Amino acid sequence: AVVSTQSTGTASVLLSQLFSLPLLFLPILLPFLSLPINIGRCHNFHNGGFSRGPIISTIMQFVLALLISAVSGNNSPSDATTISQLLEPSLQDGTGNYTDLTSLTRQPSAHFGVYFTAAWCEPCRYFTVALAAAYAKLRHHRRHFYVIVVSRDTDEGTSQRYLGTLPPGWFRVRDKGRELERELGIVYPPALTMLDNRFRVVNGDARRHLEEDRRAKFYPWDVTQR
C-alpha cells in the first residue's frame, strides 16, 4: 500500500509539471498570437475605420495572464529564511531614500506585498492602479503595508523609467529579482505575494484576492488563517 501511494504521488507531480511546462513558453508566443490583430489594426487605420486592435490585444493578454495565474504556482512552500536573504537589507524607494528592512519588520502587524511587474505588461497597468488605490487607503488608515517591486524588464533603462511611474513610497529590489521570482514560484506578471513581518508567505495569489476586494476590507488577505 505504501508503494502504491508513493507511485500515485509521483505520477501526480509529473502530470502537474507536464501541464505547467507549456505555460513557460506563452510569453514568447504572445507577439505571434497578437500578429493577426496587429495586421487588422494596420488595415483599419489605412481605411480610415475604427481600430479595435488595441482593445482586443489588451483583452487577450489580460485573459492569458489570468489563466497563467490560476494554474501556476509554487508546489513547494517558500522558505522564509531564503526570502529574507533575497530581499535587500536596505530598500530604496521611488524618491531615492533608503530604509532599513529590519526596522520595518519590528511592527508585528507589518505586511509586505512583493509585486512582480513590467513596462511591457498590459495587465500590469490595470492591476497597478488597483494596488496603488489599496496601498493609499491602507496607509491612510496607518496600516503597516509595504510594497516591494520586482521589475521583469531586462533593459535597465526601461526598468528605471517604468519604476519612476510607480508610487514613490514603493520599494524596489535591484538585485536577486530572478532568484526571488523562482523562490516564490512566479511565472508571469502581474503577480502579488503577501508576506508577514517574518517573511512567511501568507498569500501566494494576493493579486486575485485584491482584485476581488478593491476596498481592502480583508487585508492582508491571509489565506493561512482560514
Image: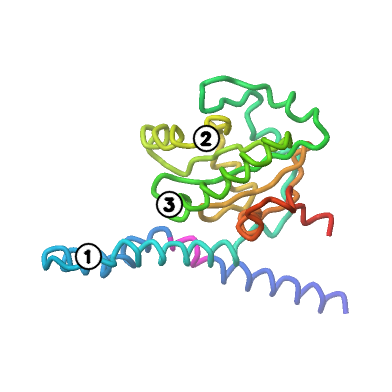
Dominant secondary structure, magenta: helix
- The x and y percentages for residue 90 are 63, 23
- Could you tell me the amino acid type at mark 1? Arg
Indicate the quadrant where residue 3 lies.
bottom right
- Could you tell me the amino acid type at mark 2? Pro
Q: Residue at x 37, y 37 (%)?
A: 158
| Residue that numbered label 1 is attached to | 41
Q: Give the vertical position of 25 relative to 146 (above or below).
A: below
Q: Is residue 142 left or right of residue 130?
A: right
Disc ID at residue 166: none
Give 188 or 215, whichever is nearer the viewer: 215
Q: Magenta span covers which residues?
A: 21-26
Q: Residue at x 17, y 68 (%)?
A: 49
- The x and y percentages for residue 133 are 58, 45
| Residue that numbered label 3 is attached to | 121
| Residue that numbered label 2 is attached to | 167
Report how far apart the C-alphas of labels 1 and 3 lie in the structure: 20 Å
- Could you tell me the amino acid type at mark 3? Cys
